[in-house]
Image (spheres, grey):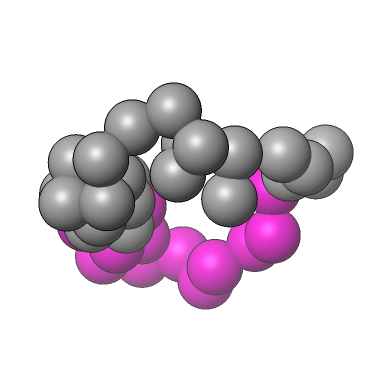
Amino acid sequence: MCMLARKPKMLVAIALANKMARAVWAMLTREEDYQVPKGAVC
């Protein structure tokens, strides 16, 4: 993980949890399946 080199572990964990929660919320409200983001590279 690129962020781990620059930020504290707990901050990275919270940021990733927030990102995942927003993605899940969007999928649930739009009734869509998960799609892997294109170009998701560190």
Which residue is painted at 72% across and 39% down in the image?
42
> 8 or 40, which is in the foreground?
8
Judge whether 26 appears above or below 36 on screen.
above
Residue 13 position, x and y percent, is 25, 55
Q: How many marks?
A: 0
In which quarter of the view is residue 28 placed? Answer: bottom left
**Is 27 colored magenta in this rendering?**
yes
In the picture as drawn, the residue positioned furthest to the right comes out as: 39
Which residue is painted at 52% across and 71% down in the image?
33
Q: Would you say 10 lies left or right of 2 here? A: left
Which residue is painted at 54% across and 68% down in the image?
34
**Is 13 colored magenta in this rendering?**
no
Q: Would you say 4 lies left or right of 7 here? A: right
> 40 or 33, which is in the foreground?
40
Residue 18 position, x and y percent, is 20, 47
Q: Would you say 18 lies left or right of 23 here? A: left
Point out the stretch of residues depicted in magenta.
21-37
Residue 4 position, x and y percent, is 45, 44
Visible residue check, residue 25: no
Which residue is painted at 27% across and 51% down in the image?
9
